[in-house]
Image (tube, rainbow, N blue to C red):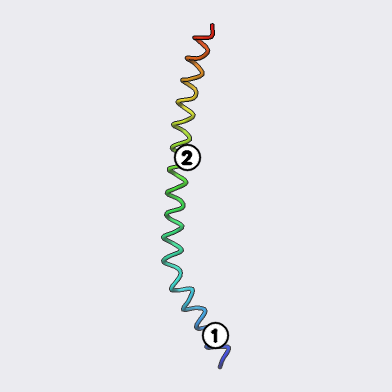
Amino acid sequence: MDDLNAVMAMILDIERAHPSYMREKGESQDATKTKETSFAKIDDWMRAFYAVAKIWSG
């Protein structure tokens, strides 16, 4: 019976932790999208910068 109670307690802990896990997973995915968007903007800017630098350097 003690084993059963221990397993039930573990299941309850998992059920309580799941919403937090899902929220943090979503936040992580949002952060990844933001990071990728930022890197794409920097990449575009650097391409333009190098194009201008190439023109100025002759």
Q: Residue furthest bottom?
A: 1
Q: Residue furthest top?
A: 58
Whole-angstrom CA distance, mark 2 to mark 1, is 43 Å
Residue 47 image point, x, y percent: 49, 22
Q: Which amino acid type corresponds to the residue marked 2 in the rendered image?
A: Glu
Determine which residue is flagged by label 1: 6
Residue 58 image point, x, y percent: 54, 6
Residue 20 image point, x, y percent: 43, 65
Determine which residue is flagged by label 2: 36
Measured along the vertical axis of the image, is residue 4 above or below residue 28? below
Which image quarter: residue 26?
bottom left
Give the residue displayed 44% in from the left and 44% down from the top.
33
Give the residue displayed 46% in from the left and 52% down from the top.
28
Q: In which quarter of the image is the N terminus?
A: bottom right
Q: Is mark 2 on a helix, strand or loop?
A: helix
Q: Which amino acid type corresponds to the residue marked 1 in the rendered image?
A: Ala
Residue 25 image point, x, y percent: 46, 57
